[in-house]
Structures are given as structure tokens and as C-alpha cells.
Image: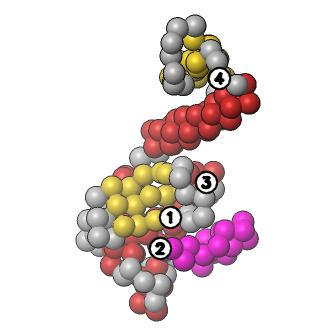
Amino acid sequence: MSLEVKIVRSQNRQKTISARLVGDVIQITAPAGIPQDRLDEIVAKLKARIEKKLQKKQLNAQVDLHDVAHKLNHKYFGGELKIESIEYSTNQNTVHGNCNYKNKTIRISHRLANMPEWVRDYVIVHELAHIIEPNHGESFWKIVSRYELSERARGFLLAKGWEEDVGC
Ligand SMILES: [Zn+2]
């Protein structure tokens, strides 16, 4: 995703840079006196942040992860897990999923949206299993193996260069 950027240098006494999204265009208003290289730097950061936010919004609108998690909960956990929230996140570049087992909130890396569904489902099952078992112990992997394709999915992710998610 790449949005168009339109920069307006303000002629009044504006001191800060502001950005807003109008359709597919990021409109930026900047102080007249700001050096170009400084402005470019800030605009690049703003653009990346806005695009990430938008991407997250679009991903979560496309797929109802609650629905997916609900089905997996029923199939592999007897519907016993309480899931507070689950969503795609664009802030995770090192782990593919993240589960806060105390709050029962799950975040799934946006990169999984471009992978096969059975891989995404594996990551969700993995994170759901953390609600029961926070650590990556033997009992944890036993729960995860209820999902028939878990070994294959782990192999798939490793082949993609994704490290095992030691964080969670
Ligand atoms: Zn884990």
C-alpha cells in the first residue's frame, strides 16, 4: 500500500506539522521555514505510520478473526476458552502472534494475512493454547498438536524464515 502525499507549506504562523488523510491522499501542512530534508524525514515517518494504521484497519475489516477464533475454539478447545479480543496487528515484525493470556487478547501479525489459511489458523491455535498454557512446555505442544496441520504449519513458517515465536 502506498498513499499519495500532498504537502502544503503554511504561510501563517503554524509551528508544527500536521497530517490528515483525505480519501487516498495524505495532506500535510508544514511550517514555511522548515528545511526540506527535515520535512522529508518527518513526512516519511508520518506516511509509514498512516499506511500501517490503514492497512490494519483494512485487514481487520476483510477477515473476521473473532469468527475464525470462535470456530477454532469450538473445534479444538471444546469452546471453553474465553477470548477477549483478537485482531491483526501491523506492529509485529519479529513474532507471528502474540497472546496476553491474562487479558485474553490475541494479536496476529498482518504478514499472516498473505499466507494460507491453515497457517494462519495454526498461529491462532498456538495463541489460543497460550490461554491455557503460557509456556512452551511439553503440555503446551500437546495442546497445539490437536490442530492436525500444526507440524506442517511450523515447517512452513520456518521455511519462510520466521523464527519460532519465543516471545509468546
Ligand atoms: Zn508461543
The stretch drawn in magenta includes residue 152:
yes
Which residue matches tag 1? 97
* Direction from residue 38 to residue 21 in the image, left or right: left
Q: How far apart are marks 1 and 4 (CA)?
A: 40 Å
Instruction: Say whether disc 1 or disc 3 marks the residue closer to the N-terminus.
Output: 1
Verify CB contact (< 8 Å) between mark 2 and mark 1.
yes
Q: Which mark is residue 111?
A: 3
Element assignment for label 1: strand
Which residue matches tag 2? 168
Q: Where is residue 157 in the image (x, y as percent from the top left)?
A: 65, 69
Element assignment for label 2: loop
Which residue matches tag 4? 34
Instruction: Say whether disc 3 or disc 2 marks the residue closer to the N-terminus.
Output: 3
- Range of magenta residues: 149-168
Classed neighbour count for the residue bearing mark 1: other residues with Cα under 10 Å, few (<14), some (14–19), many (≥20)? many
Viewer-closest of 167 and 11: 11
| Residue 74 seen from this side | no
Classed neighbour count for the residue bearing mark 2: other residues with Cα under 10 Å, few (<14), some (14–19), many (≥20)? some
Instruction: Say whether disc 1 or disc 4 marks the residue closer to the N-terminus.
Output: 4
User: Which of labels 3 and 2 is toward the front?
Assistant: 2
Quadrant of the image containing the N terminus: top right
